[in-house]
Amino acid sequence: MTAAAWSPSGSNMQPWRAYVVTGGALAEVKKRAGERLAAGDPWDEAEYEQYPPTLKSPYRERRAAFGEQRYGALGIPREDLEARQRAASANWNCFGAPAALFCYIDRDMCAPQWADVGMYLQSVMLLLRAEGLHSCPQMAWAKFHASVAEVLSPPDELMLFCGMSIGFEDATADPARTGRAPLQETVTFLDRR
Ligand SMILES: Cc1cc2nc3c(=O)[nH]c(=O)nc-3n(C[C@H](O)[C@H](O)[C@H](O)COP(=O)(O)O)c2cc1C
């Protein structure tokens, strides 16, 4: 976390606020979320829009391909919504991970500061790899932000961007990876004099 704190940010504002949660505190967060899932509680009111209301091409297709790859690797067919939901609910158990990071951002911040927070989280994730650890950033936790706040007691001016599960890789899990768009879809090289 000391190294990740050196992530760049516009005007060096460092607009991230992270809580690293383990042991009894994480067990309590998981328990509260698990109880709400079991009770069929609705998600908390969204504090930010996770995706545009209508996804245009090519994002729509990429998102659909992601679903196929992720759930396909778990052997869950497209039409089995219940199995998909069950698999998604593993988010709120942090996929069994023993540590989590909950990342907040001040409500007053603008788009560039959200990008700063993304860079910070990527720094954390890469540094975790250097320690032999794996991680999964999770917007899913924003859906239960009130339960997380009950345990973490963040100041009111902060909003939960995402959680992040942290632990060692489950080497028995299907190694199938999500793909990436061909480079020419996301990068343009120009070299003019
Ligand atoms: C900001 C952010 C939020 C994410 N939220 C979730 C999540 O809630 N649950 C999850 O399982 N994965 C989540 N992911 C992981 C993405 O689904 C994953 O990075 C993407 O599908 C590509 O897969 P890969 O990173 O394994 O190659 C998130 C990633 C980012 C960057």
Image (tube, rainbow, N blue to C red):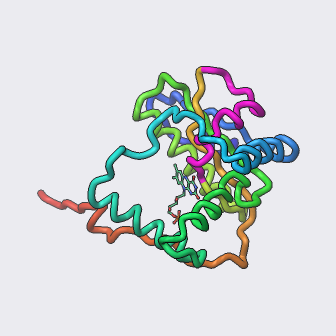
Quadrant of the image occupied by residue 171: bottom right
Q: Which residues lie in the magenta part?
A: 137-156
**Tally of marks:** 0
Where on the picture, by quarter, is residue 172? Answer: bottom right
How far from the left and from the top, in percent, is residue 81?
A: 54, 65
Asked whether 151 falls inside the magenta stretch, the response is yes
What residue sits 59% from the left and 48% below the top?
140
In the image, residue 82 sits, relative to residue 52, either above or below, namely below
Q: Is residue 142 magenta?
A: yes
Which residue: 63% across, 78% down? 174
Q: Quadrant of residue 49?
A: top left
Picture coordinates of residue 11 (x, y %)? 45, 28
Q: Residue furthest right?
A: 24
Q: Which residue is at the front of the view, 122 or 51?
A: 51
Residue ID at (86%, 47%): 23
Q: Which sits in the foreground, 51 or 19? A: 51
Could you tell whether 187 is left or right of 172 in the image?
left
Q: Nearer the viewer, residue 107 or 42?
A: 42
Quarter of the image with the C terminus is bottom left
Q: In terms of image quarters, where does ligand 1 lie?
A: bottom right
For the point 63% across and 21% down, the residue is: 156
**Left or right: 137 in relation to 186:** right
Q: Position of residue 117 (x, y in %)?
A: 52, 39
